[in-house]
Amino acid sequence: MYLALLLLALTAAGWPVTPPTVVHPWAPPATPYGPGHRGIDLAAPPGTPVRAAATGRVTFVGTVAGQGVLTITLPGTAAPPLRTTYEPVRALVTEGADVTAGQVVATTTEAPSHCASGCLHWGLLRGRTYLNPLLLLHRAAPSRLLPVAGVPEPE
C-alpha cells in the first residue's frame, strides 16, 4: 500500500486549495466507527477554487448528508485504488470525466461547519479505509551517500 502512495507522490500530486492552511488535522478513529477526523480541513471560504490533488477519474458527484461531494479515483494505485474526496463543493466536472493534477474541479460552498470562515474537507480512502491525505504530498528525495570528514576510505 505504501509503495503505491510513494509512487503516486512522485507524480504531480498537490494541494487542492492555495494557500494551504490546515485548520483541522487528520485524527484517525481508534475503531472503524469511533470518533475522529477522517481527513483534513483546509481554510477555504465559499467560492474558493478546488483543484484535483492528483490525476484521476471523477467517480462520484452528488450530495451526502446535505453537502456537495466530489470523489476522484486515482489509477495505478493498486487494488482497491486510492480515492480523494472533497466537500462541501459545487462540482465543475461530471462523473466519468478524466482530470489532471491541479485542474480546477469544483468550488467550495457554504455549509454548516466547525471552521469559522469556511473550509474544504479533503479525504483519502483505499476501499473503506481512511488514510491521511497528506501522504499524497510526500516527496521522496533520492538517497545520496556523502563522505564523512576525518574518516579514511576503505582500501
Image: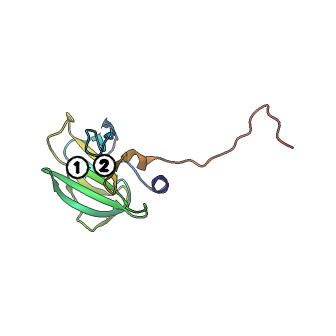
Residue 147 x, y percent position in the rendering: 74, 39
Numbered circle sitting on residue 123? 2
Instruction: Classify 10 Å Cα crowding around label 1: few (below 14), some (14-19), many (20 and above).
Output: many
Residue at 60% from the left image edge and 49% from the top image edge: 142
**Is the C-beta separation of discs 1 and 2 under 8 Å?**
yes
- Secondary structure of the residue carrying tag 1 is strand
Question: Who's the residue at 46% across and 57% down the image?
Answer: 4
Residue beneath disc 1: 87
Question: In this rendering, which labeled residue sits more in front, label 1 or label 2?
Answer: 2
Position of the N terminus, as image quadrant, is bottom left
Total tally of numbered discs in the picture: 2
Q: Give how far across and how far down residue 53 sits, in percent.
A: 36, 53
The amino acid sitting under disc 1 is Glu
> Residue drawn at (19%, 44%), measured in percent from left and top?
46
Secondary element under disc 2, as helix, strand or loop, is: strand
Which residue extends farthest left?
66
| Residue that appears at 24% across and 56% down | 70
